[in-house]
């Protein structure tokens, strides 16, 4: 694991700067103590990172769970009661892993996964623009279209007009330009610029800018536009930031409902992110999904026991890790330790980082996820790839992550049904001589009730005086619905002077009396 430390250490620093504001912002959006987000980030990095089989995936508190957490804290009567649901949700996730439910992760179509990555990239860009200009920092962590404060993604963009903070906007623009220069030019000039990551440099620059402009009435950046890590006065006050579950409410059915909801949503988000991060991993590592559920469940149990938010694997952190050159899980683990050490030792220094600088880092991450070239690439692959892709993108941007994925999967299923309809059989017109049409129909390997319409239409369209060869030698499964259609057609064929030659592995039959009787001898194959 340590042989790639030259790649993993710089990557862990970038992930740390991406994770820090996300941990705090998601806690804020969830109506939970700010420290709970940091706990989840630390556990997601150190514990889940160590137990997971993913080399590049990074876990922490997820924006997709913020609305569930906010509602549950109120429903269950307090944060300590909610923590019981987090612990139970973790146990349920462990059971999912034991029962090998992780196989679900392999059934998400590639077009939907790419749509998810692109949609998240666009959402990151749209949500971070207000922060970038020093306005409405809270909306940046609310990754759904209709926000908790009553606005939506686009209303926040229009609200920037007249509300720009000059200092935050200036250092944000400088940081973004420097990051682009670093990525496109400097890293190609010297290996030094690959070791020292651009995000680290712009964060240092942002801190210096804040210190230099503190006394300036125009360019000074005030508290709400800076990182806000809780600062304990004493060791006891530091320990006082931890919350513990109130297990007295474990018999409350509402707690169990929330626990199952957390387990289900967190598992789905994790499996989606596993598929997505594996897809963009340049080394094409494959993450064992059942082990991932076990790791996530263990992380949620520990996080809940000490006051942390629910954890999932998160594509924003994971993509930042991959883009920064992370090679092994060491990058994930180190970022967790960096969160822990910095919160204990340098919270005041962290609180000097302008949010607009971190927004610039996230804008670059978002752009790399949603490159315009990907839209062109998906369009060229045809409508079967393009439609599920674009539906997923629009669904995520205009609703939320899981709804967008659901819409994309729904469209993907429709595409599969259409293709199944089209690929049930192959027709070949062999001869039109002697006043008799000779047509060969070869059925596919598996023919189910989905194919009823296509086969029925084809048989009904056959002209009178046709000689039909029906080849089922390659068919391994023939649904009863199809057999009944063939049996009905055999009756109509006599009226239309259509002769049928049935070709199977067992025998060749001319004008079979009953298809039902013929296939009864081989109910599971043709």
Image: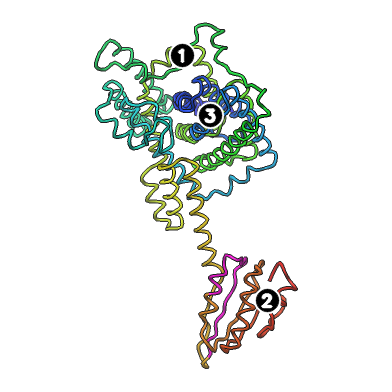
Label 2 crowding class (10 Å Cα cut-off): few <14, some 14-19, many 20+?
Answer: some
Judging by the rendered image, the residue that carries numbered circle 3 is 60
Judging by the rendered image, the residue that carries numbered circle 1 is 347
In magenta stretch: residue 450: yes
The residue depicted at 62 percent of the width and 71 percent of the height is 482
Q: Quadrant of the N terminus?
A: top right
Q: Nearer the viewer, mark 2 or mark 1?
A: 1
Q: Quadrant of the C terminus?
A: bottom right
SS under mark 2: loop
CA gap, disc 3 to disc 2?
57 Å
Dots 3 and 2: beta carbons under 8 Å? Answer: no
Residue farthest bottom in this picture: 434
Disc assigned to residue 65 = none
Quadrant of the image occupied by residue 248: top right
Compared with residue 226, is residue 153 higher up or lower down, i.e. above or below? Answer: below
Can see residue 155? yes
Numbered range of the magenta stretch: 436-456
Judging by the rendered image, the residue that carries numbered circle 2 is 504
Dots 1 and 3: beta carbons under 8 Å? Answer: no
Q: Position of residue 369 (x, y in %)?
A: 42, 40
Q: Position of residue 478 (x, y in %)?
A: 65, 69
CA gap, disc 1 to disc 3?
19 Å
- Looking at marks 3 and 2 on the same chain, the residue that comes earlier in the sequence is marked by 3
The chosen color scheme is: rainbow
Quadrant of the image occupied by residue 476: bottom right
Residue 449 or 110: which is nearer the viewer? 449
The residue depicted at 71 percent of the width and 67 percent of the height is 524
SS under mark 1: helix
């Amino acid at each position: 694991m340590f042989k790639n430390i030259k790649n993993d250490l710089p990557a862990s620093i970038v992930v740390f700067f991406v994770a820090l504001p996300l941990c705090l912002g998601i806690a804020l959006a969830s109506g939970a103590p700010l420290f709970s987000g940091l706990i989840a980030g630390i556990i997601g990095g150190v514990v889940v990172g160590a137990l997971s089989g993913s080399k590049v995936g990074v876990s922490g508190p997820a924006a997709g769970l913020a609305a569930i957490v906010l509602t549950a804290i109120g429903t269950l009567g307090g944060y300590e009661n909610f923590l019981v649901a987090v612990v139970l949700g973790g146990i349920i996730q462990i059971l999912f892993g034991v029962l090998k439910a992780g196989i679900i992760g392999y059934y998400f179509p590639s077009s939907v996964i790419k749509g998810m990555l692109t949609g998240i990239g666009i959402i990151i860009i749209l949500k971070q623009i207000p922060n970038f200009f020093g306005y409405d920092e809270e909306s940046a962590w609310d990754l759904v279209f209709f926000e908790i404060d009553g606005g939506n993604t686009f209303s926040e963009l229009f609200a920037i007009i007249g509300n720009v903070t000059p200092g935050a906007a200036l250092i944000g623009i400088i940081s973004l330009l420097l990051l682009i220069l670093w990525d496109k030019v400097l890293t190609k000039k010297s290996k030094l610029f690959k070791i020292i990551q651009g995000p680290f440099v712009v964060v240092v620059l942002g801190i210096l800018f804040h210190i230099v402009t503190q006394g300036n009435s125009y360019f000074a950046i005030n508290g709400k536009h800076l990182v806000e890590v809780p600062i304990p006065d004493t060791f006891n006050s530091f320990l006082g930031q931890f919350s513990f579950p109130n297990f007295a409410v474990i018999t409350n059915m509402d707690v169990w409902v929330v626990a199952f909801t957390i387990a289900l949503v967190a598992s789905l988000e994790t499996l989606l992110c596993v598929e997505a991060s594996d897809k963009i991993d340049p080394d094409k590592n494959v993450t064992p999904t059942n082990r991932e559920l076990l790791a996530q469940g263990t992380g949620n149990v520990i996080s809940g026991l000490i006051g942390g938010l629910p954890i999932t694997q998160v594509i924003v952190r994971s993509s930042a890790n991959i883009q920064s050159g992370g090679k092994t899980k060491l990058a994930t683990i180190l970022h967790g330790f960096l969160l822990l050490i910095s919160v204990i030792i340098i919270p005041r220094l962290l609180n000097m980082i302008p949010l607009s600088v971190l927004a610039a880092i996230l804008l670059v991450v978002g752009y790399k996820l949603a490159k315009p070239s990907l839209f062109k690439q998906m369009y060229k692959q045809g409508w079967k790839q393009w439609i599920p892709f674009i539906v997923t993108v629009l669904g995520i941007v205009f609703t939320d992550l899981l709804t967008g994925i659901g819409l994309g999967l729904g469209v993907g299923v429709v595409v599969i049904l259409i293709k199944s309809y089209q690929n049930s059989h192959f027709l070949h017109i062999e001869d039109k001589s002697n006043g008799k049409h000779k047509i060969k129909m070869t059925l596919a390997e598996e023919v189910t009730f989905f194919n009823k319409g296509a086969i029925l239409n084809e048989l009904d369209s056959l002209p009178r005086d046709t000689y039909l060869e029906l080849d089922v030698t390659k068919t391994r499964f023939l649904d009863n619905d199809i057999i009944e259609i063939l049996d009905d057609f055999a009756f109509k064929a006599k009226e239309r002077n259509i002769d049928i030659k049935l070709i199977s592995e067992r025998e060749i039959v001319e004008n079979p009396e009953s298809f039902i009787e013929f296939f009864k001898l081989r109910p599971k194959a043709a």
